[in-house]
Image: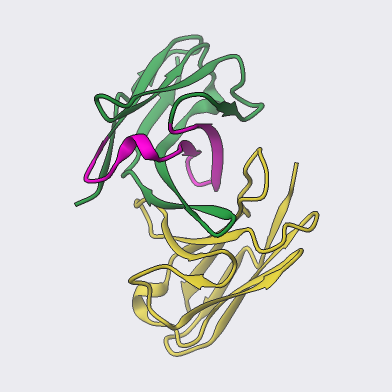
Chain colours: A yellow, B green
Amino acid sequence: DIQMTQSPSSLSASVGDRVTITCRASQSISGYVNWYQQKSGKAPELLIYAASSLQSGVPSRFNGSGSGTDFTLTISSLQPEDFATYYCQESYSTPITFGQGTRLEIK
Amino acid sequence: EMQLVESGGGLSQPGGSLRLSCAASGFAFSSHWMHWVRQAPGKGLEWVSRIRSDESVTTYADSVKGRFTISRDNAKNILYLQMNSLRAEDTGVYYCARVSRYNGGWTFDYWGQGVLVTVSS
């Protein structure tokens, strides 16, 4: 099974900050990574697919990059609505695995 | 408007059964793989099961294999998850999710709102 190790597990930041979340796969998965945002009590929403493609309707301050084993999600200028939990997910093989999540909190 | 609406959750005793449904509308349901993903209280996302658009392929996480059965009715646009021999560790919110494909890959592009399953005596 592929393990997705996400870091940090939590992060405090201020509105306007630039933040980066990292996901490392236990083996090479090419660019088969998706990123999701989940707000409290809500279903996850797709932000980035194929490591770097922005889902339609998602603000351009969200950026994904990486290939092979190392992937990043960057939010260029945090907005109040961005405080949520973020998950990476590999779509390379089954069982499908998610990172453990990064909780982004207001400083 | 595209919608996925789960139902069928609730309280079950350990060893009991529940059947979850996910009613799809606003898209060509029969053209998409569908998955179930769950989330234990306060925890992260865990993939549970998937089914191919034509029902010819089903796959399960080891944690539910032999106990859960995924199925679909493409005529009614409904996805199901039959959960038997329930355990306390099956407690959580269950989401159905639609798969969309892109060049060589796929992603969960739409999720239902989730349904709560509680397994407790």
Count all numbered tags in the image, as a single digit: 0
Instruction: Classify residue A44 as left or right of residue B66.
Output: left
Extreme-right residue of the structure: A27
Q: Which of B53 and B41 is in front in this view?
A: B53
Q: Quadrant of the C terminus of chain B?
A: top left
Image x and y of residue A42, in percent: 34, 52
Up the image or down, A56 lies above or below B82; here it is below
Does residue B48 belong to the magenta stretch? yes
Up the image or down, A86 lies above or below B45; here it is below
Image x and y of residue B65, in percent: 61, 20
Instruction: Classify residue A3 as left or right of residue A83.
Output: right
Q: Residue at x 59, y 27 (%)?
A: B60
Q: Which residue is drawn at 76% across and 63% down?
A: A69
Image x and y of residue B64, in percent: 59, 23
Q: Which residue is drawn at 78% across and 58% down?
A: A28
Q: Nearer the viewer, residue B120 or A7?
A: A7
Up the image or down, B76 lies above or below A21; here it is above
Does residue A27 belong to the magenta stretch? no
Find residue B20 and report its image quarter.
top left
Q: Which of B76 and B60 is in front in this view?
A: B76
Question: Which stretch is magenta?
Answer: B24-53
Up the image or down, B93 lies above or below B11; here it is below
Image x and y of residue B16, in percent: 45, 10
